[in-house]
């Protein structure tokens, strides 16, 4: 397998750690409180492996609540809606974007060829039907609309779709090239038909088109702006871009040219950057914002009791984890070069770290059992999930110490971990710090700003990284880019020919049972090598004021507000 795509933004975290060395005054008390809580919970005796065959957690995680579409008689036309975002989106160019928070904004302004519904099934959006694939799997035909226009008035048709797909494949720094697979040609057969030719079958293609790879941009604007498209993006959607104040806000306004404009009720949507979960919750309570993403599990019980608020929740398709830097010495896109550190060279040290982590303890103490244990990149609700795919390495700190001794490591073994400097991430990191100490590790936490974290991981300037992924419906998008050799999001610099071969086979067949078996083997190899240790799956927790109707959040985690409105 060879996937060569240079990235600058390589993950879609919900950035979820200060050390004793950190400057925050509350750092030491919090670390002590976490340690005491873990001890009180008796977490050293918990065996996550026994829980992971089904939901990945042992406690009730809350009932799914996706939200409901707004009925016409429930909402009024007009009004400005404000949504609090937990981190700033990166560049608003679907070809280049890496951030989950950009996906929130895109969903209101950049429709896709396909979307996913609340059951995580693919449904047409700008396409008029699901694609058809030739018998040999190398030709995919996509029927599309030709009766609508972009926000700048440019006609939307098959030629516009071809222009976007070609751009995704060729623009420097594209985050979409590897997602689209082995495309050799894109043809606009007529105004309503796009034909994609592949060098070999590529099963994940349709799923890839439900995200940024399927967001079709105005060819006129793309040509005029080039790599500056993010400064004034133009798509087809309920809203269009108005302005952005860096590190503060992004504003969208209703697009009168949108083909379903009569179903769009709001005049304007403002995304306001509020990184502290408690402040987002406070703004939600006060009415300064009507929607808040990524609520803290600590705040949810109280918010659920507020009569003027509701908490939308669903099980995420993604995960949070820690990634070791194995061979990303010179940055993403550069030739792999072994990192000169013990944990990079010896998988036994990485295995010991996994043995030292009590996933069930993290979920119980830090997240009130709202989140669930994760031991692989495949979500339990996925049609590709199996018992083998959900198998967990048991928590065993004694065995962790024995492995370190076998590897010739003197304990405590120091290792520095970078993490986002928001309170939830710091809480998680300090829990890990306390937990792995028993297994022989001295985890030294280095909190950094979210944007800096993304830059550092891309440059390979880390030993251990705490970050996650929001998840996709096809497992390939949760695995190959992260652990495939040359993968566009493989910040670990991990390379294993056996894993590459298994992933290639899985990409080339539409047989679900065959793909399941191949992914089972991939997961087993990942547990042997541990380039990335999966920790837990978040619930998508979004706070919404009852003054707004029609907001929905599905398992992909994206907040859908394009057809929302202020309650009458």
Image (cartoon, rainbow, N blue to C red):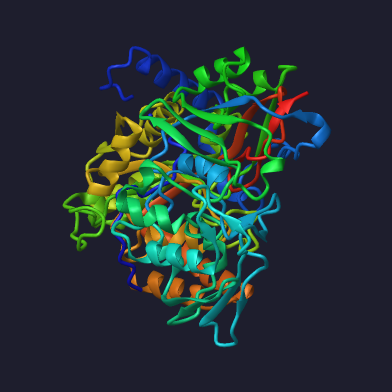
| Position above or below: 271 against 532 | above
The one of 244 and 87 positioned closer to us in this rendering: 244
- State which quarter of the image contains the N terminus: bottom left
Residue at figure coordinates x 58%, y 76% from the top left: 141
Q: Is residue 162 left or right of residue 510?
A: left
| Position above or below: 258 against 154 | above
| Position above or below: 539 against 283 | below
Q: Is residue 103 left or right of residue 116?
A: left
Could you say where residue 147 lies in the image, as x and y percent from the top left? 63, 61
- State which quarter of the image contains the C terminus: top right
Outermost bottom residue: 136
Residue at figure coordinates x 19%, y 53% from the top left: 329
Q: Is residue 84 visible?
A: yes
Could you say where residue 455 lies in the image, as x and y percent from the top left? 27, 42
| Position above or below: 423 against 488 | above
The one of 9 and 495 positioned closer to us in this rendering: 9
The one of 484 and 196 positioned closer to us in this rendering: 196
Q: Is residue 196 left or right of residue 127?
A: left
Could you say where residue 390 lies in the image, as x and y percent from the top left? 57, 56
């Amino acid at each position: 397998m060879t996937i060569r795509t240079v990235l600058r933004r390589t993950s879609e975290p919900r950035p979820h750690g200060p050390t004793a060395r950190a400057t925050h005054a509350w750092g030491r008390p919090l670390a002590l409180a976490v340690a005491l809580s873990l001890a009180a919970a008796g977490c050293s005796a918990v065996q996550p492996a026994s829980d992971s065959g089904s939901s990945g957690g042992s406690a009730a995680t809350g009932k799914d609540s996706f939200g409901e579409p707004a009925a016409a008689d429930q909402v009024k036309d007009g009004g400005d809606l404000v949504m609090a975002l937990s981190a700033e989106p990166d560049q608003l160019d679907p070809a280049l974007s890496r951030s989950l928070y950009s996906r929130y904004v895109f969903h209101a302004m950049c429709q896709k060829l396909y979307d996913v519904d609340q059951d995580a099934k693919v449904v047409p959006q700008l396409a008029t039907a699901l694609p058809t694939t030739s018998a040999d799997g190398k030709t995919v035909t996509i029927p599309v609309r030709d009766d609508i226009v972009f926000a700048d008035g440019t006609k939307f048709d098959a030629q516009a779709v071809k222009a976007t797909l070609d751009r995704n494949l060729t623009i420097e720094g594209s985050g979409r090239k590897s997602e689209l697979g082995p495309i050799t040609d894109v043809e606009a057969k007529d105004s309503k038909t796009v034909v994609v030719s592949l060098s070999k079958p590529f099963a994940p293609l349709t799923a890839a088109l439900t995200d940024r790879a399927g967001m079709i941009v105005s060819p006129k604007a793309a040509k005029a702006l080039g790599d500056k498209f993010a400064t004034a993006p133009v798509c087809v959607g309920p809203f269009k871009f108005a302005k952005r104040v860096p590190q503060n806000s992004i504003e969208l306004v209703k697009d009168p040219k949108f083909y379903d404009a009569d179903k769009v009720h709001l005049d304007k949507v403002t995304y306001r950057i509020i990184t502290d979960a408690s402040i987002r919750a406070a703004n939600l309570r006060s009415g300064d914002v009507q929607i808040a993403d990524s609520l803290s599990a600590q705040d949810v019980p109280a918010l659920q009791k507020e009569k003027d608020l509701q908490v939308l929740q669903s099980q995420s398709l993604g995960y949070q984890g820690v990634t070791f830097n194995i061979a990303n010495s010179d940055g993403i896109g550069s030739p792999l070069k072994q990192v000169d550190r013990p944990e990079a060279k010896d998988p036994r040290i990485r295995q010991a770290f996994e043995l030292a982590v009590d996933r069930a303890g993290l979920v119980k103490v830090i997240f009130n059992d709202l989140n669930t244990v994760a031991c692989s990149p495949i979500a339990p609700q996925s049609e590709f999930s199996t018992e083998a795919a959900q198998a967990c390495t048991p928590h065993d700190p004694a065995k962790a110490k024995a492995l370190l001794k076998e590897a010739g490591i003197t304990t405590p073994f120091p290792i520095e971990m970078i993490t986002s400097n928001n309170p939830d991430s710091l809480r998680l990191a300090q829990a890990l710090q306390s937990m792995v100490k028993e297994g022989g590790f001295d985890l030294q936490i280095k909190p950094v700003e979210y944007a800096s974290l993304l830059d550092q991981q891309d440059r390979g300037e880390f030993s251990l990284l705490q970050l996650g992924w929001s998840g996709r419906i096809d497992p390939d998008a949760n695995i190959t880019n992260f652990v495939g050799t040359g993968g566009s999001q493989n910040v670990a610099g991990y390379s294993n020919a056996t894993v590459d071969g298994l992933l290639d086979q899985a990409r080339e067949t539409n047989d679900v049972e065959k793909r399941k078996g191949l992914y089972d083997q991939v997961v087993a190899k990942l547990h042997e090598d541990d380039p990335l240790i999966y920790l837990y799956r978040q619930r998508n927790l979004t706070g919404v004021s009852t003054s707004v109707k029609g907001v929905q959040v599905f398992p992909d985690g994206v907040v859908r507000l394009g057809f929302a409105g202020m309650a009458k």
